[in-house]
Image (cartoon, rainbow, N blue to C red):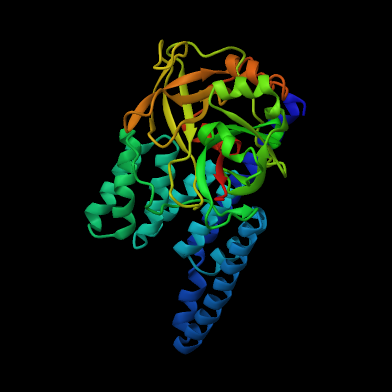
Amino acid sequence: MHPQLEVKAVTLNRRSAAARLLRLAAALSCAAQPLRLAAHVHSDGANGQGARLQVERLALLQSARLALSQGQAQPALQLLERAALMSHDADTEMLMVLAMLQAGEFRNALNFASHTAGAHKDEPEALALYAWLQALSGQAAYAARIIDAGLQRLPQEAHLRTLQPLIQQLLDGSWTDTATPRPGPAAFGAALPQQAQALGSGLLLNEGRQALLALPDGGLAWANGRPLWLRNGLGQTQMAQLSRGASNTSTESALAALGLSLLNLDTQLTPPAGQPPLRCAARDAFAGSPVAALIYLPDSGTGTAWPAMQLGFVGRMGLVPGQPGLDIALPAQVSAGPVFDQAGRWIGFAQRGGQSIQQQAASLLPLSALNAALAPMLDTPPVQAQALPLSADRLYEQCLPLSVQAFGGVS
């Protein structure tokens, strides 16, 4: 797409999303008014009408959940808008947040989650969802304050107490929890078997036809055709296999030396309409450059998850010889994850320097080294020479559909 047309498409998409939020705000402010007026007219009639509307609303919510399970975010939003006109309820609005996230509208979802948490103080699950989204998008300190304030008001609330240590681990860079359930996207696409295991974090390449990520043992366990699945940050899941190019000895050795594997997807994973495709920086990042790494936090199950964005800077020397350092700590169970500059351009992979301690500052595997290893198998992603820095929420929104989590079947 021509750059000017691409910018225009993104602008129109943002205007449409903003118009939806304004329309929803107006609708929600008066949604309960007809029922209140009816109650003054006739109590029994109002109760009957309220019960009928509640049944219709719950049916709309169920239809919206079905639409989300099929990857139909926009139809789900239309159903939920109808439900929101019937009554002002937190469950409707939290489902709308999930639909916006599946549609790739993270900033709109974050704003609407803030409204839901503030308007439904009797529903702490809404506050927990808002805090978790803030924590994952690089605002863990603010998220911790949100949870603390909520616990001052509701000291024993289960949702808030569950998230408090998880957010603190994100803030400290000392993630150890792999079992506690946490909010995640509505998954759709290929189904994961219950015995599948989460393997690592990666990045979609070649317009969503391939993915680069770190697999245990360099992916050797999956070279014999064992099934693999990839799920992006919007919840879409597809099956994948190790790239045929990886069977080439020199290519395989080059990627294995970097601790990475290239996968081919059965079905292309593409970002939503209006989302910019993957772009690369024109040169390697220099010391002092602000960066963001996207990683999927360790999980002992196959539950859906959004990636965590960790903000930091490029250092001079890392723990891996010849690679610059990053002031980003990767959990012990996370070996690598894609890194972007402040403008959302891909600049390399964060990698742990060793396995001897629980969490450790990462090194940056620069894009120049990756391009040299990947050249025999795919074209270099388009380069964006100049770009303006993005806010944290916009950076997360842009990178969300490009990040993937890998799952492997158990033999």
Residue at 56%, 71% (x, y): give it: 57
Q: Residue furthest right?
A: 2
Front residue of 132 and 222: 222
Give the x, y percent position of residue 300.
43, 49
Judge left or right: residue 320 versus residue 248: left
Front residue of 318 and 308: 318
Residue at 50%, 59% (x, y): give it: 93
Front residue of 62 and 301: 301
Instruction: From this view, report whether residue 117 is shown above or below residue 215.
Output: below
Give the x, y percent position of residue 324.
45, 14
Instruction: From this view, report whether residue 146 is shown above or below residue 359.
Output: below
Residue at 77%, 29% (x, y): give it: 1
Residue at 41%, 56% (x, y): give it: 126
Instruction: From this view, report whether residue 305 is shown above or below residue 337.
Output: below
Give the x, y percent position of residue 40.
44, 81
Give the x, y percent position of residue 288.
42, 13
Q: Which image quadrant for residue 284?
A: top right
Judge left or right: residue 173 versus residue 410: left
Instruction: From this view, report whether residue 161 is shown above or below residue 250.
Output: below
Q: Residue furthest bottom?
A: 44
Q: Does any portion of residue 398 appear in the rendered image?
A: no
Label count reads: 0
Q: Does any portion of residue 182 appear in the rendered image?
A: yes
